[in-house]
Image (cartoon, rainbow, N blue to C red):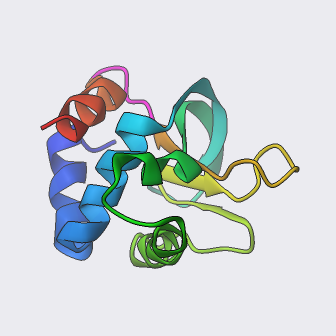
Amino acid sequence: MKTFDEILSQISQVLTSEQLQLLKDTIRYGSWGDCEMGFHNSDGVWVSVYCYGYCTNDAKNAGHFSGRKCSAMFRSIYQRLGMLGKGSGANEYFAYCNDWWGDGSGDMFFIRENRDDNTVSKFEKWACE
């Protein structure tokens, strides 16, 4: 699994500065908690692993983007990161699920934890920069 720096470099090459800001806003304002989620391994096999979830609906609280703009931007982010699916998707490092609770109250974005690299903690620190 890649290190935080390698993952950040990779996503910085495919996401716009606004999309990176939206991810930061989601991490800062949407912190929800840990769970297990399905991700692809580097060989494409699905695995259920430890991760941390963030409610994307709360990203608008940062004040950078409206709720409607956030939704459109997230669709583009998911597509650029190769994880756009019908209601959910994942790659090796990130996953998402629309309507996590089934009541329209929240869409979720997940970051896979690499405990050797403390990936989630590093993304949270990055979000505050």
Please tell me which residue is depicted at 41% across the width and 69% down the height of the picture.
Answer: 81
Q: Is residue 72 above or below residue 38?
A: below
Q: Eyeballing the image, is 46 above or below 120?
A: below
Picture quarter with the C terminus: top left
Is residue 9 in view from this perspective? yes
Q: Is residue 41 left or right of residue 114?
A: right
Q: Is residue 28 left or right of residue 74?
A: left
- Up the image or down, 1 lies above or below 59; here it is above
* Extreme residue in the right direction: 102
- Residue 11 lies in the magenta-colored region: no
Report x, y in % for residue 85: 66, 74
* Nearest the eye: 60 or 71: 60
Give residue 78's position: percent from left, percent from top.
49, 70
Instruction: Examine the image and state in which quarter residue 42 appears.
Output: bottom left
- The x, y position of residue 56, in whole percent, is 54, 51
Name the residue located 36 percent from the left edge and 30 percent from the top edge.
120
Q: Which quarter of the figure is the N terminus placed in?
A: top left
Nearer-the-camera pick, 87 or 49: 87
Residue 89 at x, y percent in the picture: 63, 63
* Count of number-bearing discs: 0
- In front: 61, or 73? 61
Q: Which secondary structure class fits the magenta region best?
A: loop
Residue drawn at (31%, 67%) of the image: 19
Magenta region = 112-116
Vertical side of 40 occupied by 127: above or below: above
**In this orientation, which residue lies closer to the viewer: 115 or 28?**
28
Locate residue 85 relative to residue 71 in the image: left or right. Answer: right
Q: Note whether residue 41 is visible.
A: no
Residue at (82, 43) in percent of width and height: 101
